Amino acid sequence: MANSFLIAPPSGTLRTVRLSAGVWPSIWSGLGSGLCLRLGWVLLGSALTSSAWASDPQQDATSAKDQPEDAQVVMNSTLDDRLFYQILAGEIAARNNEVTLGFRFLSAAAKSSGDALLYERAIQMAIQGGSGDAAWGAASQWVKAEPNSLKAQAMLLRVAIATKRSQGISDALTRIISIGNDAEKRDLIRAMPSTLKRLPSELATQAEAIADASLTQVKADPRFASSAWSAIGFLRLQAKNKDKALDALNKARSNDVADIDTGRLALALFEQGASGAEPVVLAHIAAQTNDPKPRFQYARLLYLENRTTAALAQLNQVLLSAPTLVPAWLLSAQIYHQQADFDKAQANAKQALILNAQQRASGQQGRADTYGRQAKLLLADVAQANGLWAESGRWLDEVGSEDEAVLYRRAVLLGKQGREDEAIALIQGPALTESPAENASDADADADAIKSRMQLTVRLLREFKRLDDAYLATQAMIAAFPDDAELLYGQAMLADQLGRPAEMERLLRELIQREPDYEHAYNALGYSLVDRGERLQEAQALIEKALTLSPNDPLITDSLGWAYFRQGRLDLAAQTLERAYAIKQDPEIAAHLGEVRWVQGKTAVAIQLVREAIARYPDNAVLKATVKRLGMPLQ
């Protein structure tokens, strides 16, 4: 419910502003009044007696002597009768729920004294009464009295956001940035995207315009232009406008490619799959010769994109310049493990463990426990891959906890030794009985824990290639958690793996009926029909529906391009796949686009495209199969 508050603003005209009470807590949390320190009293008590006005001066001096030092300073400060009366009357009025009257007294006291705590208290009273105009007036008066006070300007910004004054927000941000020193300016510019992300919904579409106006001066200053354009880029990225964010990145780069904020935006855009971001990342890394962090972040993102060979090359360069960087040793060990180079994986994981222990002993590292755990799990995985069951078990014992990651590895160890039923029983534990649906509905049961164990069971059955059992286990999960759309989708994908297309289609159509906005179901069903060359017009319609639910999704766009190809519409297929590949340089999209170009007779283009994709993803099975099937010469 909204609160109404009547107040006389400085002009003397009466205005009523209606604000939602829910606006204030997030903005004013932790404000506190702090006002009583100015008077030297903490609480007035439940009542004031006449004796309080006629106290003995000697007694007052003695009392002051017993006060804390900061309280004595306040009591000795200049406080004339009028100011004391205004403060006291304002607080009494507020305690009697006469907030309007209390605000008038406190705002008058603040204006006459110029005291920051009084301004804060007056604004707080306006908030308490729900009057945005009163709060704005008091905050504006405070800024006028102390134009170089960062605290006053920050208060004005908060009130401007809460009361939805876009021009006030822009002006306050401009002043806040202008009065900071160089380091503060940069921090304030960086904070702008997160600040404007909290704008009321009515102002959300104006966020970029507010930022642009607020940053006009610093954009013209070469010292801060890259930070300013990066802030605008992050705002555009928040609004899911990658193309405009990339434009901001290029402006930041043209000013200073080595700037840390240019690198931050480039890495963020690269992570989002923005075409054109990677060259800026590489240019930034080349310019940041003394800082290994951007290169490590780039390597991590390459790894997440399954570009493991390129990631490893970057990590090796990181370790040349920063040989004590534990996360780089861990990530390289993980990649070597995936590439089945177990000797290097073991050596790097052990190096990470040694460095981690040294840094922990010297108190240099805050994530020592996490890194140590990761190293031990990797060493357990390497030992398992080498068939050293006992050694793998010892490393798991070293981890020191029996969480799901450790439990799953113990189960896999049992399975590798031919003890699959024991492994499944270990994962399921006593929580899963023959009727998991009953457990999941039991008020005393931990439904999340049960669901997690069931998902681990399915994962383990997949590991053991027992797909039929995994399918049945997924059915049991769906019975226990019937509202989980992801489970039904997972069952459909298992049906596809089992070669049951009719069952997969039935499940996906059931999912579409239950969740009509679940775009992955439309895409999966459409693509499966395309891949089998069946009902191509219907398949295209399903994929187009998925694309309306998730516009510009590169994988769904790829499905549509493949549907055009299967219909013999080669030019449209090439255009669509080019668009998908521009959004995300995915190896399967590259394989599809390469095949289309090959069939079009553009063999040189196809070979170049596929050669580059294989250089990025040398282990991708779809790329390898496409090259083999087409007889494409890559040498």
Image (spheres, rainbow, N blue to C red):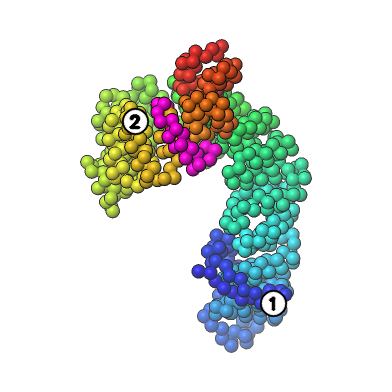
Residue found at x 56% / y 37%: 272
Q: Secondary structure at mark 1?
A: loop
Q: Main secondary structure of the magenta part?
A: helix
Q: Is residue 93 magenta?
A: no
What stretch of residues is rendered in magenta? 531-553
Residue found at x 23% / y 43%: 435
Q: Is residue 547 magenta?
A: yes
Q: Quadrant of residue 324?
A: top right
Relative to 130, 343 lies left or right: left
Residue found at x 40% / y 34%: 525
Would residue 407 be seen by someone viewing this image from the given angle? no
**Label drawn at residue 501:** 2
- Reading the image, the residue beneath label 1 is 13
Q: Is residue 439 above or below residue 610?
A: below
Which percent across, then down, holds residue 350?
A: 47, 26
Q: Quadrant of residue 472?
A: top left
Q: Is residue 250 above or below residue 107?
A: above
Q: Secondary structure at mark 2?
A: helix
Pick the residue in front: 56 or 511: 511
